Image (cartoon, grey):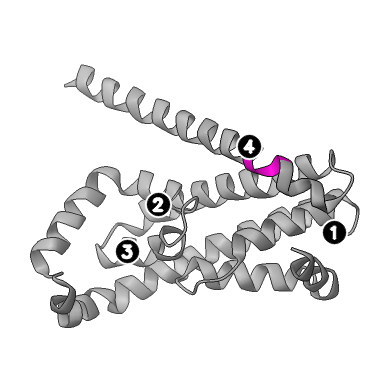
Amino acid sequence: MSSLQQYLIDYGYPTLFIVVLLESFGIPGPGQALLITAAILAAHGKLNIAAVLITAFTGTALGGCIGYWIGRRGGRQLILRFGRYVRIGEPELKRLESSFDRYGIWFVAIARFFEVLRQLQGIVAGIVDMSFRRFFLANLAGSALWCAVWGLGSWRLGRQIRSYDDLSEKAGTVFVVMLLMVLLVLLGIYVKRRLKGRNAS
């Protein structure tokens, strides 16, 4: 954590933007850790929280869109060409497309909270030819939720912490609770829409 703190203090918002941008279109990186660190620094007056949130949101949303176009332009051809080595072919892609037709918006919105999925959600959406409008809206929602939980949440927590060492003792429980609350809200919206759809039919 201390090395990330110093790096952010030295290079500021461009570092945060570039890291979350790259991570959001498939390149593994410490984007989430960097956002948390930047938010804690903002809580201690070393960065501005509004700038941190705007930077992270812009980087992750733009990165997701880049990942989408990477998947849309060439991802499917690569999978059909090399996927046989890992037993992925046209039938598996068809099943994935069918799942995305029903749950794609939820996958894109929630995937940012999980390692690996966070890096691949845009590429996968592009590969299965999810409409860009649906992806764009879900990507914005997921980016906003991710920044709110890990950015704004870390900032609020950081204001109550006197030293950085306190974070390891308090952050885990707080963020698990916050994440569960977000997932419960999304689940409630999903169930409500399903029930509304059944009643309409």
Pointer 4 residue: 173
The reply to whether discs 2 and 1 touch (Cβ–Cβ < 8 Å) is no
Q: Amino acid at mark 3?
A: Val
User: Residue at 84% across / 48% down in the picture?
Assistant: 43
Q: Which residue is mark 3?
A: 124
Residue 149 lies left or right of residue 188; in this view the side is right
Give, as a three-letter code, the residue at label 1.
Leu
x%, y% of residue 87?
A: 13, 71
- Residue 172 belongs to magenta span: yes
Start and end of the magenta stretch?
A: 170-174
Q: Position of residue 146 (x, y in %)?
A: 57, 49
Q: Amino acid at mark 4?
A: Thr
| Disc 3, SS | helix
Residue at x-position 12% and y-position 70%? 89
Q: Secondary structure at mark 4?
A: helix
Which label number is shown at residue 47? Answer: 1
In this figure, which residue is indicated by the disc labeled 2?
A: 108
Indicate the secondary structure of the residue bearing disc 2. helix
Specify the amino acid type for callout 2: Val
Image position of 68 with respect to 187: above or below:
below
Around disc 1, counting alpha carbons within 10 Å, would you say few (fewer than 14), some (14 to 19), or many (20 or more)? Answer: some
Is residue 62 shown in magenta? no
Residue 95 image position (x, y, % from top left) = 14, 55
Asked if the residue under mark 1 is in contact with the one under mark 4, i.e. CB atoms within 8 Å, the reply is: no
**In terms of sequence position, does the residue under pointer 2 or pointer 1 come before the other?**
1
For disc 3, the neighbor class at 10 Å (few under 14, some 14 to 19, many from 20) is many
Q: Nearer the viewer, mark 4 or mark 1?
A: 4
Q: In the rendered structure, which disc, 3 or 2, sits on the residue that comes first in sequence?
A: 2
